[in-house]
Amino acid sequence: MTEEENPNDPTPKPDDFLTKYAPKQNKPGDGMKIVGYNLLVLALYSLVCLSLSGGFALDAFILFFHVLLCLGLAIDKRSWLWLLSGLLVLIIGFSTCVTFAGMK
């Protein structure tokens, strides 16, 4: 019986070691969930704030802290997706506030 065929051998084979202890690879779409969730949160609080009378000021206030949070997490986690999320929230949120402030 050879070493490969011995079922009682406790030493791990190279293939077993790689499958057990290798870091798991992220799926390509996993990171974009961060951006999607942040845009969903932006849409939800924008709808709530803009349904109020003069709510665009409250929306701008919440937007400011949302962008700061995203930028802080981008620095802390060293992730470009948090930076992208913060920039998208800033651009979309600012344009939403300006549009609704001009309409009222």
Image (tube, rainbow, N blue to C red):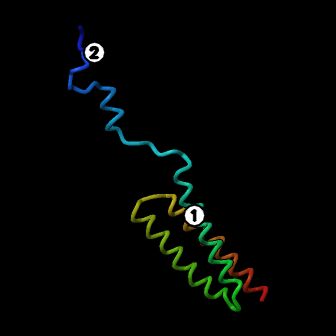
Residue linked to disc 2: 4
| Label 1: how many Cα within 10 Å (few below 14, some 14–19, many 20+) | few
Q: Quadrant of the C terminus?
A: bottom right
Q: Residue at x 51, y 63 (%)?
A: 83
In this picture, residue 87 sits left or right of residue 3: right
The number of numbered badges drawn on the structure is 2
Q: Tell me the kind of residue under disc 2.
A: Glu
- Nearest to the observer: residue 2 or residue 89: 2
- Nearest to the observer: residue 48 or residue 56: 48
Q: Nearer the viewer, mark 2 or mark 1?
A: 2
* Element assignment for label 2: loop
Q: Is residue 45 above or below residue 34?
A: below
Mark with earlier residue (2, 1): 2
Q: Quadrant of the N terminus?
A: top left
In this picture, residue 33 sits left or right of residue 1: right
Where is residue 101 drawn, in percent x and y? 72, 86
Residue linked to disc 1: 37
